[in-house]
Each structure stands twice: as structure tokens, then as C-alpha cells.
Image: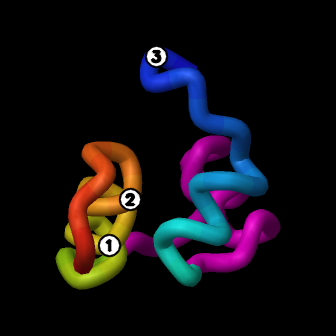
Amino acid sequence: MRCDLSRRELARRSGISERYIAQIEAGKGNVSIVLLLLLASAIHGSQP
């Protein structure tokens, strides 16, 4: 939200499904370091 990114756009940029991102946001998904790196790269606009 702070970066003005929708869940759909974050999913597109990171290659992670919207559903899984929603689970992570709700605290129900298990997140690996690889997924965290993909999300961080997508949020900050760099290539994973």
C-alpha cells in the first residue's frame, strides 16, 4: 500500500499468485527467503 502497488500488480511483478500474497498478508502463508526476495524486488522495482 505504501508503494501504491495493488496486490494484482505485485503478483504480476513478483510471479507469486495473488491468492498466496493474500495469505502472506493475513499471516497464513509460510514465506521462504526466496519469496521474500522476490517480493522485495517487485516492490522496489528491480529485477529478481
- What kind of residue is marked 3? Arg
| Quarter the N terminus occupies | top right
Identity of the residue drawn at 58% across and 55% down:
10
Q: In the shown orientation, is residue 20 left or right of residue 8? A: left
Q: Which residue is mark 2?
A: 42
CA neighbours of label 2 inside 10 A, class few (<14), some (14 to 19), many (20+):
many
Pointers 1 and 2 in contact (C-beta within 8 Å): yes
What is the spatial separation of the Cα atoms under label 3 and label 1, in whole angstroms?
Answer: 17 Å
**Kind of residue sitting beneath label 2:** Ala
Magenta part of the chain = 16-31
Closer to the camera, 13 or 24?
13
Residue 47 lies, in percent from the top left, at: 25, 73
Label 3, residues with CA under 10 Å away: few <14, some 14-19, many ≥20: few
Q: Secondary structure at mark 2?
A: helix
Q: Residues within 10 Å of mark 1 (few under 14, many from 20)?
A: many
| x, y percent for residue 21 | 63, 60
Q: CA distance from mark 1 to mark 2?
A: 6 Å
Residue reaching furthest to the front: 46
Towards the viewer: 26 or 47: 47
- Determine whether 2 is above or below 37 in the image: above
Numbered badge on residue 38: 1
> Could you tell which of marks 3 and 1 lies nearer the N-terminus?
3
Query: The disc labelled 1 sits on which kind of residue?
Result: Leu
Which circle marks residue 2 in the picture?
3
User: Is label 3 in a helix, a strand or a loop?
Assistant: loop
